[in-house]
Image (spheres, grey):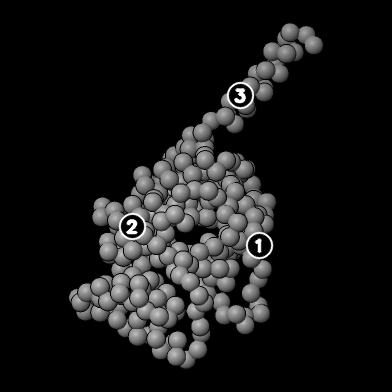
């Protein structure tokens, strides 16, 4: 091969190699204003349909997110679409180099259209570093949106970060409550036994939720909810208490979640 030919090939190949070697955050910031996507390995207990719904793995595949709305399907729901394991994909809307919102998908991922720049598969380390920087250093909706992908991302030490986020008094309530709610659902998964779903269980849960509504009357239900979550003999009641504590965002509740999740 002639020297001039080798030089011409180097001009073509080397810039692309250098671009591929740039950190994920730098590639995203350098894209200006557009939607960019990247994929990474998800936890084995996460699943989804690749586009419209996914399970974060904290409450089983029958509890799924649909455009941010959490729904739990009954066991007899025969119309529930399969929840398949696979990679996770994060779509990020960048505006002048800063993330505006993030969207998560899990499962068999479809090919994206030309309007989205797909960076393809990245390492869990790179994905975790970027998502953590947005969750703790970002603002508004983007910071809230980044919490869920960190829960789904494989091998990421999620509970310490969520505990810090849930306790961060400088953040808006929506941010702290999202972190607290995720910890509460994960903590409920550590309880032994199985919950039942009958009339008696429904009444027990309603009693817990009525107790939690004391907060709306400027009363403090947290001590009673903590006691229920720790000592009640019925698993379904303890789960209801944990869920209710997750909505309070109270520091005492965060301490309980962190202790239940330690070592998990």
One can see residue 172 in this view: yes
Closer to us: 8 or 204:
204
Nearest the eye: 227 or 203: 227
Q: Residues within 10 Å of mark 1 (few under 14, many from 20)?
A: some
- Closer to the observer: label 2 or label 3? 2
Q: Is residue 64 left or right of residue 235?
A: right
Q: Quadrant of residue 107?
A: bottom right
Nearer to us: label 3 or label 1: 1
Q: Is residue 75 above or below residue 147?
A: below
Q: Earlier in the sequence, mark 2 or mark 3?
A: 3
Left or right: where does residue 245 sit relative to residue 36? left
Q: Nearer the viewer, residue 155 or 115?
A: 155
Tag 2 residue: 166
Q: Residue at x 67, y 23 (%)?
A: 13
Query: Residue at (40%, 76%) from the top-left corner?
Result: 238
- Left/right of residue 114 with respect to residue 124 in the rendered view: right
| Residue 140 visible within the image | no
Tell me the SS state at disc 2.
helix
Q: Residues within 10 Å of mark 2 (few under 14, many from 20)?
A: many
**Residue bearing the label numbered 3:** 15
What is the secondary structure assignment of the residue under circle 3?
helix
Which residue lies at the image location 31% right of the left edge and 60% below the top edge? 255
> x%, y% of residue 24?
52, 37
Helix, strand or loop for disc 1: loop
Q: What is the residue that sits farthest to the bottom in this orientation?
A: 199
Classed neighbour count for the residue bearing mark 3: other residues with Cα under 10 Å, few (<14), some (14–19), many (≥20): few
Q: Position of residue 64 (x, y in %)?
A: 54, 68
On the picture, is 113 further left or further right than 217? right
Residue 34 locus on image (x, y percent): 52, 44
Give the labeled residue for mark 1: 84
Mark 3 to mark 1: distance in Å?
38 Å
């Amino acid at each position: 091969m002639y020297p001039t030919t080798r030089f011409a090939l180097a001009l073509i190949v080397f810039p692309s190699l250098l671009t591929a070697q740039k950190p994920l955050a730098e590639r995203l910031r350098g894209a200006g204003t557009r939607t960019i996507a990247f994929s990474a390995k998800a936890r084995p207990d996460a699943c989804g349909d690749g586009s419209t719904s996914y399970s974060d793995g904290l409450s089983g595949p029958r509890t799924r997110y649909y455009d941010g709305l959490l729904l739990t399907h009954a066991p007899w729901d025969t119309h529930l679409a399969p929840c398949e394991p696979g990679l996770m994909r994060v779509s990020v809307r960048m505006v002048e180099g800063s993330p505006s919102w993030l969207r998560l998908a899990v499962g068999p991922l479809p090919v994206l259209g030309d309007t989205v720049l797909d960076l393809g598969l990245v390492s869990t380390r790179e994905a975790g570093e970027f998502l953590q920087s947005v969750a703790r250093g970002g603002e508004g909706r983007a910071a809230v949106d980044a919490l869920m992908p960190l829960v789904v991302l494989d091998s990421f030490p999620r509970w310490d970060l969520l505990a810090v986020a849930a306790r961060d008094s400088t953040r808006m309530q929506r941010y702290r409550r999202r972190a607290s709610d995720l910890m509460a659902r994960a903590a409920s998964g550590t309880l032994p036994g199985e919950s039942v779903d009958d009339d008696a269980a429904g009444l027990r849960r309603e009693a817990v939720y009525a107790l939690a509504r004391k907060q709306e009357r400027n009363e403090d239900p947290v001590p009673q909810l903590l006691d229920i979550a720790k000592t009640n003999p019925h698993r379904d009641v303890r789960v209801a208490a944990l869920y209710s504590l997750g909505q309070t965002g109270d520091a005492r509740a965060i301490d309980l979640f962190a202790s239940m999740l330690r070592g998990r």
